[in-house]
Image: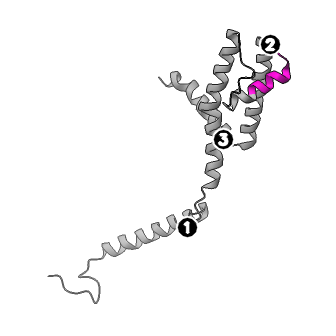
Amino acid sequence: MKLLFWPLHQVYRGIVWLANSPRTLILAYLGMIVISGSLYSLAEKKSVGDSVWWAVVTASTVGYGDTYPTTWQGRVLAGLLISTMVLLVIPLITAHFASRLIVDADAFRHEEQEEIKQNLRAIRAMVEQLNGVGSADRPGAPPAR
C-alpha cells in the first residue's frame, strides 16, 4: 500500500518545495508560459511571439479571444494550461505571498520555546518533589482535617 502512494507523496513534496521558494515558483510560471507558447506554436502553426502572448492571456484566464486554439492538440494544451494555472500555480503564488503578510509578532523563536520547555521541566520536578513530601510533614503546614 505504501508503494502505491509513493508517487503522490513525491508530487506533494515537489509542490511544497515549489511553494516555499518564490524564485522557483516564478521560474516555474515563466517556464510554463514559454513551454506552452512553444507547443501552441507547433500545434497551431502560429509565430512564437503570438503563441507566448496566447499562453500569457490563457494562463491569466483573461482570454481576450484574439488568439485561440482551433486544433484538438491546441485545445488540450489550453485546457491543461488553464487547469494547472487555476488549480495549482495561482493558489501557490497567492498562498506564498499571503503567508508573508500574516506574521505573528507574538510567536516564540525556537530558542525561546526551548527555554520555556526547560523551565516547565524544572517546575514539574519541583512540583513532584513537593508532592512527595506530605503536607503534614512540612513545617508550618496546617493540620489535616
Depicted 48 relative to depicted 16: above or below: above
Mark 2 sits on what residue? 42
Which quadrant of the figure has residue 92? top right
Q: N-terminal of the two: label 3 or label 2?
A: 2
- Using residue 126 as the reference point, say whether residue 65 is left or right of it: right
Q: N-terminal of the two: label 2 or label 1?
A: 2
* SS at circle 2: helix
Residue in the foreground of this view, choosing between 97 and 1? 97
Q: Residues within 10 Å of mark 2 (few under 14, many from 20)?
A: some
Q: Are marks 3 and 1 in contact (CB under 8 Å)?
A: no
Q: Looking at the image, which residue sits at the far left?
A: 145
How far apart marks 3 and 2 lie (CA) works out to: 29 Å
Q: N-terminal of the two: label 3 or label 1?
A: 3
Give the percent coordinates (x, y) of residue 93: 66, 41
Q: Main secondary structure of the magenta part?
A: helix
Give the percent coordinates (x, y) of residue 140: 28, 90
Amino acid at the residue labelled 1: Glu
| Residue shown at the point (80%, 16%) measured from the top left | 41
Q: Looking at the image, which residue sits at the far top?
A: 71
**Region in magenta:** 45-55
| Residue shown at the point (76%, 17%) measured from the top left | 40
Amino acid at the residue labelled 2: Leu
Mark 3 sits on what residue? 93
Give the percent coordinates (x, y) of residue 18: 68, 37
Image quarter of the C terminus: bottom left
Is label 2 or label 1 in front? 2
- Using residue 139 as the reference point, say whether residue 57 is left or right of it: right
Give the percent coordinates (x, y) of residue 129: 36, 73
Amino acid at the residue labelled 3: Ile
